[in-house]
Image (cartoon, rainbow, N blue to C red):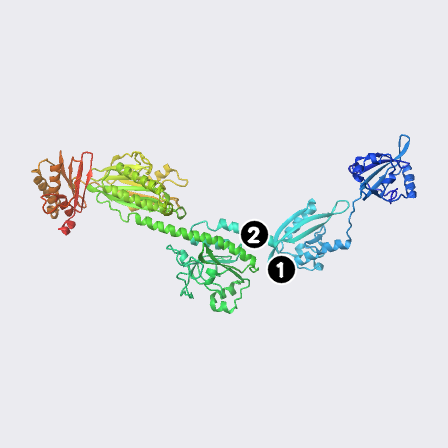
Amino acid sequence: MPESGEGPGTEPCIGVEEAASDAAAIVTLAGMVIGWTRSAEELLGRSAREVVGGSVGRLLAVPEDPCRVAAIMERCRGGRAWSGVVTLSHRDGRRVAVNLRVSASFQVGDDECFLLSARERITRWAMGQSVLDGFLIRSPVGMAIVDMDLRCTWVNNTLESIGGIPREQRLGRRLTDLFPGLHAETIEDVMRKVLRTGEPVSDFEYLGWSWADPHRQHAYSTSFFPLVDVEGAVTDICYMVLDVTDRWNARQLISMVNEAGACVGSTLDVMETAQELADFAVPRFADFAIVDLLEPVFSTEGTEGTEGTEGTEGRGTWLSDAGPAVTGPVMRRAGMSSVREGCPEAIAQVGDPVDFIPPPHDLDLLVNGEPVLIPVLNPDNPQWVVEQPSRTSSMREFGLHSLISVPMRARDTVLGLTTFVRSQNPAPFTSDDVLLARELVARAAVCVDNARRYTREHHATLTLQRSLLPHTLEGGMAVDVASMYLPADAKDGVGGDWFDVIPLSGARVGLVVGDVVGHGLSAAATMGRLRTAVQTLADMDLPPDELLAHLDDLVLRLSEEESHDASADLIRTAVMGATCLYAIYDPVTRKCTLARAGHPPPILVTPEGRVSFPELPAGPPLGLGGLPFEAVDIELAENSLIGLYTDGLIEGGERDVDVAMAHLGDALRPCDLPLETLCANVRGLTSTPQSDDVAFLVARTHALSADHVASWDVACDPAAVAGARALATRQLRAWGLEELAMETELVVSELVTNAVRYAPGPVRLRLLRASRLICEVTDTSNSSPRLRHARTTDEGGRGLFLVAQLAHRWGTRHTHEGKIIWAELDSSVSAARW
């Protein structure tokens, strides 16, 4: 029956799981099939109905060998199984080679039977030893075997070429003997761990040098696994080495560029950003790095001279149509760093003008050029000797041997040149390093350009802000004033804080401080508009609560107008809201009237040093609309201090407001010090850097004594005008102001005559001797006089015109009882007009 056999004692060992899946059949001694399994059906495609009851010989694909069949039967009837290879016939006609096993005979009823089990034979391919040896020796992966003492016993060709040491010199020696600088001790520690634990170590990466390429660092990935004998004991270690320098460099490039994004550009300062780039590159990438920027980059004016890359556009003042036209340096050293302390390689220091561009390039390199790679610097190169003699000497002295120069450009703007040099690192720069240098400089260029643009905008905003703030403060005889203004840190932008001192009629003075919501050019422009509005409203002699109400209406109207203006986003001056504190101090009554709109309360310090923060009605911030403001009167002793400030002085960061206000009181408690000294004390309370502007205005109050004030009640009779003139003239003689007697008589005569003629009720005349002579006439009428030009034929109407010509200034202010018409007289002004 079988085609071939292995004979006794040669049957393979079959597991229980394998035997259970074999095709099986039961055959009688006469060769008839009496049992057929489902696995047999699947193997030969024949069902049990077709096979059972028939001869087993029909299943063979070759003729039977009667002698061989008889021998097998005799063996199995003797109690011994047989196994071998036979070829069976599939139902579809194809031949199926199987491993057949015939069991020892057994009885099934009266019949002597055999169990036949078959498994389809799978060809196992064999590999010749020569092929295996060739694969191991010529594999593109470096492989070696070391013994238990970590001495090399076998190495293939690839590892021999990677290490650069002949096979004969490696055999019998350890890595620490061959590569003392290749992390050999660390690698041997890994091998010992594998020997100790029997666990493999995969993809162990490291950087190192090899004798095959001693001037360039390579990255290697090594895997270690133990070799065991038949008893499972570790006998050797095999390790495989793969040069992964390209993969390592790509990963390092991504990592370094990402790290640069976090380290470079932390501020909005051009010089600091340039220095951050140099510091980042050394020693990660280079041994010496310099960043040179064009002069226009440092300018706080316009952007001419650096933008554009086509033709001559953007060359501005440093290139002409005909090419280079520069008589001096066009760049300035903005940052540098070196592995040597003090950067001795540098020819110029930070801030110095420079003109370095690697020969043979010129200024066109900055506009249109690609990065310059000089793998090997030759100090004997004639171009370097002629064009850069000082740098040639530095190359020789410090061993500068490789260079990359990368033009710095961002948003079509030429910014400068960044140069990286190696000296202590023996590896020259490669094209891969150029990619990294380009990425580093490109990221830094965006940061430099952001800083440049911000610096210009910040400078423009500061200029606008300074131009809008008062340059001098005049408190007259009412107060002595001093101020302090601290702009916010550059990264937070200029705020909209302002203060002002406004001279008012009657020797009074208005003190105001305000804070516009937001930062930047918009806040500064809004601050200017509100300061102008406050001055205009103050000139109308409005009380503080009414002034804030009008200012609130103005802010609300401006916001509504600009919310409907399509160009508002372009000009960026939308009013978002503001806070304000306005106070009027009268030196005659020593009364201070205050009102605030969502602003911090003022600070008051008595001449004895008692500090208080008056409980004023807070009032809503400006711009909400429809809510009332309340004014409060406070009487101040002479030489009291009143301080007005913005919230930047007491808020921000982690400061507690109550603690900050207490410190402010301590700074102003020695109130007899000069006001400038007190401002310096307050300045010391501010943090650095500060996130918000700080405005502080301090005033020391004065009082007009009784000998500076004279007042009289005037009867409502035209005949009383002459008596009023006489009283005024007599008072001027007492004050020694006889030169103003004529002008004063005319002004008193006109103002008193108008009050007697047109206003019911009592009339009062008051003279104030302040920086100018002030004449006031009070009546009970609410109508304001109107200045008009009388015709030559008119009999009247020239009174106020005459007053306007004689007075330095004049006006009307309303009171609860009526109005006051006032005029300020100055001898120099009156004489000039006459």
Q: Point out which mark residue 443 bears.
A: none
Where residue 787 appears, as percent x and y from the top left, is 16, 43
Q: Is residue 4 left or right of residue 553?
A: right
Residue 607 visible in the shown view? no
Where, by quadrant of the figure, is residue 518 drawn?
A: top left
Amino acid carrying mark 2 in the image = Gln
Where residue 667 sits, quadrant-wise, is top left
User: What is the C-alpha distance between the residues marked 1 and 2?
Assistant: 20 Å
Residue ID for mark 2 = 252
Q: Is residue 518 above or below residue 209?
A: above
Look at label 1 and name its amino acid. Asp
Q: Is residue 377 left or right of residue 648?
A: right
Closer to the camera, 90 or 176? Answer: 90
- Crowding at dot 2, Cα within 10 Å, few <14 / some 14-19 / many 20+, comes out as few
Task: Work out which residue is located at the far left of the displayed protein and give it.
Answer: 719
Q: Which is in the foreground here, disc 1 or disc 2?
A: 2
Q: Position of residue 802 (x, y in %)?
A: 13, 46
Counting from the top left corner in percent of width and height, residue 112 is at: 90, 34
Tell whether 271 sits left or right of 536.
right
Marks 1,2: beta carbons within 8 A: no
Q: Secondary structure at mark 1?
A: strand
Q: Secondary structure at mark 2?
A: helix
Residue at point 64%, 49% (across, down) = 203
Location of the N terminus by quadrant is: top right
* Residue assigned mark 1: 213
Mark 1 / mark 2, whichever is N-terminal: 1
Q: Is residue 400 left or right of residue 92?
A: left
| Residue at the spot 53% in from the left edge and 64% down from the top edge | 377
Horizontal and vertical percent for residue 725? 9, 42
- In this rendering, does residue 525 appear at all? yes
